[in-house]
Image: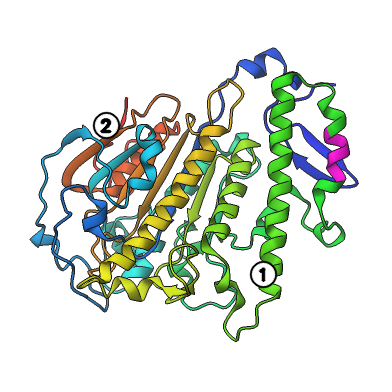
Amino acid sequence: MHITRRKFLRTNGVTLSLPFLHSLANAAESKAKPSKKLAILYIPNGIVRRCFFPGEEMAELPGFIGGFNADKTKDERRFKHVPGIYPLPLTETLRPLAEHAADVTLITGLDRSYKDGQDVHAQGASCYLTSLSPEEAGKRGIRHPNGRTLDQVIGAAVGQTSVFNTLEISCNGFTAPKESIEFDNISWYGPDKMAPSIKDPRKLYDRLFLRDSFRAHVADVTDLVLADANSLAKKLGREDKETLSQFMAMIRDIELRIGKLDRLLADVDVKIPQNEVLPRGEYIKLQADLMLLAFQTGITNVCTFMIGPERWDATLMYEGVFDKPVQHHSMTHNQKGDGYKDVQKIDAFHMRQYAYVLARMKAMKESDGSSLLDNSIVAYGAGLGDGATHQYYDLPMIVAGKAQGQIKPGRLVKCPSGTLNSNLWLTFANLMGLEIDRFADSSRTISELWS
């Protein structure tokens, strides 16, 4: 019997995908290049600029600009920079990436399109990966630049090698909506056609590894498949045995962590939606590990990952940062004096979650011995440059990974001010193998990112 990379453990109706195992692959498959992966991590409400961007440490703190206004300060940029490629400095917010400095690229100077009439936070999220310029949206009678998003375009082209073309994940655990979906989704099949993200770790786990109806009958999948795994291990070489052991340990760990969060919610007695008491770090890391398992097992090669929803005014528990739950969005509008310092603590907290993802990806080995990160593009950014002014220019953007040697990391790439972020999306599409010369309102690729 020929056993391909898509080897599964099956017991009593449970199906569990496995990572690549050399011992079970034929020669041609072992020599095949791993698939490239694209992960786009999204952070809400912008960032504290003076702690993120090199050279802005003493920048004036922003004042609040509300309503539908955006880009009102665009013509007053104080930090015009000379385009080029520079060594990567680690600002206060970037310090959690110290051990990954050789694996990441900081890109500055990126702007994005904006169209008046929709809340800035809603447009910040829903149009982040859009495929429409405001002009094209107007021609087609679409109110805002919300079209088919980058991940869906790429997934449709490369998804034939995976189970799912794309995977959409959110770390907004609220069961009761506080805002419309435009604040809480960055992936769209087309105008007003949302690609819904999965917020519940248990539902995400079920979608990736179990038949939809089987979870009701099985309390712990690993109890059922461990026997098969032990039997399979006898057929494997030493390195594959270690890979299988690590994989099964990760599956078991995820089961235990899901159970822990379930018990935490069950024991809480609050009138507000219970999910907001979840420790943010534990929740985000659990969702991230499920994303990485989906990459490792070939379930998908393209994923969007919302670390949090835009605006939302949600009270959340940033464990290890504050003693009690706080509201990120409201804090971004109170940065004067020392107010920015608490907002920056959340920026640093989010950066630590990104660093966690990169560390896990570096440790995961692919079929050719390279790491998962070596074969990936892992973007980290926001739809707003600053949450207080709602600016759509100078967006924060970090890109990790090498895309199989096509990206040269460990640098600061300063693009000319006003470079559209759709140029970066076009670059990602080309790096993922799409032979297209335009995406949305792009004008060129960001060739400085290539090796």
Colour style of the rendered protein structure: rainbow
Q: Is residue 158 left or right of residue 163?
A: left
Residue at the spot of label 1: 264
**Numbered marks: total:** 2
Front residue of this view, candidates 144 and 410 = 410
Q: Is residue 85 left or right of residue 239?
A: left
Front residue of this view, candidates 446 and 190 = 446
Residue at the spot of label 2: 447
- Tell me which residue sits at (41%, 30%) in the image: 402
User: In the figure, 144 relative to 272: above or below?
Assistant: above
Q: Is residue 8 left or right of residue 94?
A: right
Could you tell me residue 447's position as x and y percent?
26, 31
Instruction: Tell me which segment is drawn in magenta.
Output: 224-229
Residue 260 is covered by the magenta coloring: no
Location of the N terminus (image quadrant):
top right
> Farthest bottom residue?
271
Mark 2 or 1, nearer chain start: 1
Find residue 137 and report its image quarter.
bottom left
- Tell me which residue sits at (53%, 37%) in the image: 361
Task: Identify residue type, mark 2.
Answer: Ser
Question: Residues under labels 2 and 1: Cα distance?
Answer: 48 Å
Task: Identify residue type, mark 1.
Answer: Leu
Answer yes or no: is residue 141 visible: no
> Farthest top residue?
27
Could you tell me residue 316's position as x and y percent?
49, 71
Could you tell me residue 140's position as x and y percent?
35, 61
- Tell me which residue sits at (69%, 62%) in the image: 260
Location of the C terminus (image quadrant):
top left
> Farthest right residue?
12
Q: What type of secondary structure mainly makes up the magenta span?
A: helix
